[in-house]
């Protein structure tokens, strides 16, 4: 397991691009890597924005923590 | 950080004994001092200590050491000032076409020649240097700590400072900048893959 952050994702994509240009990997592998990194990037983006929003005290007080609370529509 | 100590003396140093110096008899080895050099190779600081008699050729020796570690990579000697690095790097990468192939110099050794600063350099990937800033700074702290424990190495502190200065990329990129750039790169790869597939058809 390798720790992942935005910098390491950036590095991975740069390496993939270089390898693709040098024909060291095929298109399907490059495409799969790009999609995977893209998804991981979306997740990082979400986490970052969430942290930014939650750092505002006023918002944090009234924020409904989705991970802990059950949905209103569900009768659990 | 690594410190290599080569304790050998040359055969020449051993053989030529009994030199008449100021009226007393000495062996040549009595005047053979250890030499210490500090190099920066692949994000690591390396100190090499060797006896003068073993490698009397100065700069050529240092070049050979570097080539040895780099596996025979081509090394340049530059005498003009090495480019300083700009801020807002990632923004530029995104706007001016993604220049992920950019190469810049990694400075291995700094020395003075004709009152000017000269460098032994080799080409390296810009992205690698950009991403290894923290690693270089950590290694710098280690090397400084080590140098301070050895009196004979204290003169290398200035070189270490200069090498750190030359081998780190100054940038003020935030996390968001990286995320935006990753997203652009991901799109670029997908575009390339599509182009490749359509050209195949």
Image (tube, rainbow, N blue to C red):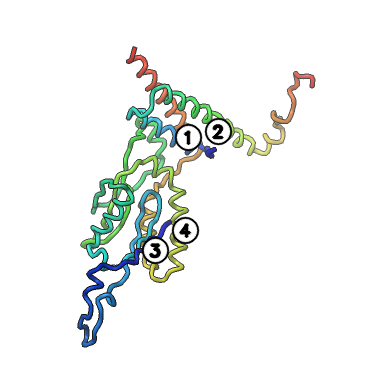
**Element marked by disc 1:** helix
**Depicted B2 relative to depicted B194: above or below:** below
Q: For the residue carrying disc 4, how many other residues have a C-alpha within 10 Å: few (<14), some (14-19), or many (20+)?
A: some
Residue under circle 1?
Answer: A9
Decide which of B84, B99 is in the foreground and name it. Answer: B99
Q: Which quadrant: the N terminus of chain A?
A: top right
Residue under circle 3?
Answer: B157
Marks 4 and 2 close (CB-CB < 8 Å) = no
Q: For the residue carrying disc 3, how many other residues have a C-alpha within 10 Å: few (<14), some (14-19), or many (20+)?
A: some
Task: Give how far apart the Cα atoms at labels 3 and 2 are.
Answer: 40 Å
- Marks 4 and 1 share the same chain: no
Residue B25 position in % (x across, y down): 24, 84
Give the number of the mark in front: 2 or 1.
Answer: 1
Residue under circle 2?
Answer: A44
At 45% from the left and 53% from the top, the residue drawn is B137
Q: Which quadrant: the C terminus of chain A?
A: top right
Q: For the residue carrying disc 1, how many other residues have a C-alpha within 10 Å: few (<14), some (14-19), or many (20+)?
A: many
The disc numbered 4 marks a residue on which chain?
A: B
Task: Give how far apart the Cα atoms at labels 2 and 1 are.
Answer: 10 Å
Numbered tag placed on residue B142 in the rendering:
4
Direction from residue B17 to residue B130 in the image, left or right: right
Marks 4 and 1 close (CB-CB < 8 Å) = no
Mark closest to the chain's N terminus, 3 or 4: 4
């Amino acid at each position: 397991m390798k720790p992942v952050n935005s910098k390491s994702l950036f590095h991975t994509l740069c390496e993939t691009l270089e390898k693709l240009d040098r024909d060291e990997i095929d298109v399907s592998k490059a495409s799969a890597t790009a999609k995977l990194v893209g998804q991981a990037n979306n997740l990082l983006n979400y986490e970052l924005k969430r942290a930014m929003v939650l750092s505002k005290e006023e918002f944090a007080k009234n924020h409904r923590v989705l991970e802990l609370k059950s949905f209103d529509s569900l009768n659990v | 950080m690594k410190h290599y100590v080569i304790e050998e003396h040359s055969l020449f140093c051993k053989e030529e004994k009994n030199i008449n110096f100021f009226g007393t008899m000495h062996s040549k080895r009595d005047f053979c001092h250890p030499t210490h050099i500090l190099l920066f190779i692949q994000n690591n600081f390396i100190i090499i200590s060797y006896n003068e008699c073993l490698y009397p050729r100065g700069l050529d020796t240092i070049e050979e050491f570097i080539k040895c570690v780099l596996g025979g990579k081509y090394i340049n000697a530059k005498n003009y000032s090495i480019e300083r690095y700009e801020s807002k790097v990632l923004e530029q990468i995104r706007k001016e076409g993604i220049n992920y192939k950019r190469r810049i110099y990694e400075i291995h050794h700094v020395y003075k020649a004709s009152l000017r600063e000269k460098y032994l350099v080799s080409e390296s990937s810009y992205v690698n240097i950009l991403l290894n800033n923290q690693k270089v700074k950590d290694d710098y702290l280690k090397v400084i700590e080590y140098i301070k424990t050895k009196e004979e190495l204290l003169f290398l502190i200035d070189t270490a400072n200069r090498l750190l200065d030359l081998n780190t990329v100054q940038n003020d990129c935030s996390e968001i900048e990286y995320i935006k750039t990753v997203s652009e790169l991901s799109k670029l790869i997908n575009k390339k893959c599509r182009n490749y597939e359509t050209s195949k058809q």
